[in-house]
Image: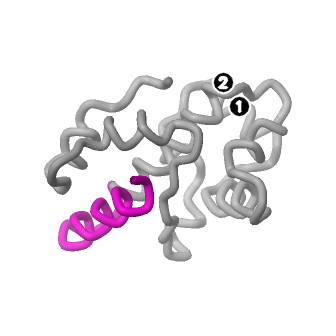
Amino acid sequence: MIELDENVVREMNKYLEGTTIEEVLVRNRKMFHFKVMFNNDQMNQDIDVLDLRPRAYNCLKRYGFNTISHLVNGVYAKENESSKKQLLKIRNLGKNTAEEILIKLFYYQFRILSDDRKKAYMQKIVEENI
């Protein structure tokens, strides 16, 4: 499993009751669900905002995923296939790198939410992943 960002995890855990985001992620490692709620400006952001490691960043760029929109539309396109499976089709992109990309996308989604929406969002994450 990829290394979790302590600062983001700490902030997420402030909004959770009775569990931690680490527990939710570990429990649902094979199929973790989260809703993507980006506006047009956020969708048009370069994937640089995800702060990916070079391997993940380079694989996405080579595949043509230059923006959040390209990434989201590319990996959430097929209903009966997980986003992780979609990412694994990219050349030289392995399981850990796919997990890193999805976790960083999840972190980005959380960070851009207004403070008053974070609690409801995190509660929804727990409900969908229990």
What is the spatial separation of the Cα atoms under label 2 and label 1, in whole angstroms?
Answer: 5 Å
Q: Is residue 65 left or right of residue 100?
A: right
Q: Which mark is residue 115?
A: none
Does 17 lie within the magenta span? no
Most common SS among magenta residues: helix
Q: Is residue 102 left or right of residue 8?
A: right
Q: How is the image coloured?
A: one colour
Magenta segment = 111-130
Residue in view at x 32 percent, y 36 percent: 22
Q: Position of residue 38 (x, y in %)?
A: 50, 70
Q: Is residue 114 left or right of residue 98?
A: left
Residue in view at x 25 percent, y 64 percent: 118
Report helix, strand or loop for mark 1: helix
Answer above or below: position of 25 versus 123.
above
- The kind of residue on which mark 2 rests is Arg
Q: Position of residue 130 (x, y in %)?
A: 39, 53
Report helix, strand or loop for mark 2: helix
Answer above or below: position of 98 versus 73.
above
- The kind of residue on which mark 1 rests is Asn
Residue in view at x 68 percent, y 54 percent: 71
Q: Which mark is residue 58?
A: 1
In which quarter of the view is residue 85 placed?
A: top right
The one nearer the camera, 57 or 86, is 86
In which quarter of the view is residue 100 placed?
A: top right
The one nearer the camera, 78 or 36, is 78
Q: Can you identify the residue that label 2 sits on?
A: 55
Q: Residues within 10 Å of mark 1 (few under 14, many from 20)?
A: some
Q: Position of residue 87 (x, y in %)?
A: 74, 42
Answer above or below: position of 66 versus 72.
above
Residue in view at x 71 percent, y 59 percent: 70
Q: Residues within 10 Å of mark 2 (few under 14, many from 20)?
A: few
